Amino acid sequence: MFHRIRRRAKGPSEAQRRFMEMVKQMQDQVPPGVGVPPTEPEHSAPAAVVDDFLPPELRVPSHDQLDGRMTAWPQPLVLDGEVVACSVCGTYRDWLILSTRDQIWLRCRAGHQQQETRLDTAWYNRHTGPADATHATFEDCLRHLGR
C-alpha cells in the first residue's frame, strides 16, 4: 500500500546542475591572501599584567598538592565478576575507597584497610565526582564521611 516505484532520473537535477556550474566558476579562483607573504605585526606597548586568577580562598588544590582522596562506596564492589570482601571481617559493602600515591585502598566500616591492585587512579577518577571538601588530616576526612 505504501510502496512507490521510483523513476530513475535521466540526468542530474536542477540543483546538481547549478552546483556543478558554480564549482566550475570557482575552480581557478584563489582566496585572498594565499601566496602573499604575511605582514609584520605592529609593535605596540605591552599590555598591563592583570592577576585574573581566583583569590586563594576560592582555589581548589591540585592533585599533586593533596596526600590522597577518598570517597564513600555504599554498594558492593564487583571486580572481575566477583564481589570484593574485607579480608579480615568479610564485609562486602559500605567501603571507603582511598586513592593515594597511585594506589587504591579499600577501607571497610570496621576500619580494616586492604590494597586493591585491580583498581588504579584512572578507575577512581572515572567513578568519583568532584571533591566537596578538603581536610587537613585523614581523621577529619573520616569524620566528614561519617566514619
Image (spheres, rainbow, N blue to C red):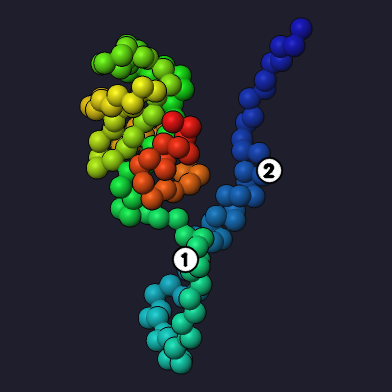
Secondary structure of the residue carrying numbered label 1:
helix
Residue annotated with mark 2: 14
Q: Residue furthest right?
A: 1
The image shows residue 116 at horizontal and vertical percentages of 26, 26
Q: Is residue 43 above or below residue 125?
A: below
**Of discs 2 and 1, which sits in the foreground?**
1
Question: Which is more toward the observer, 87 or 38?
Answer: 87
Residue drawn 43% across the image and 86% down it: 41
Residue drawn at 50 percent across, 66 percent down? 54
Q: Is label 2 in a helix, a strand or a loop?
A: helix
Quadrant of the image for the N terminus? top right
Considering only vertical position in the picture, is 144 above or below 29? above
Residue 88's label in the rendered image is none
Question: Vertically, is 23 above or below 31?
Answer: above
Residue in front for this viewpoint, 17 or 118 = 118
Q: Are marks 2 and 1 in contact (CB under 8 Å)?
A: no
Q: Between marks 2 and 1, how big is the CA–CA gap?
A: 65 Å
Q: Earlier in the sequence, mark 2 or mark 1?
A: 2
- Which residue does the image show at 25% across and 40% down from the upper left? 102
Left or right side of 50 for 120? left
Q: Which residue is mark 1?
A: 56
* Residue 95 pos. (x, y %): 39, 24
What crowding class fits label 2: few (fewer than 14 Cα within 10 Å), some (14-19), or many (20 or more)? few
Q: Quadrant of the C terminus?
A: top left
Percent position (x, y) of residue 127? 42, 32
The answer to whether residue 99 is seen in the rendering is yes
Amino acid marked by disc 1: Pro
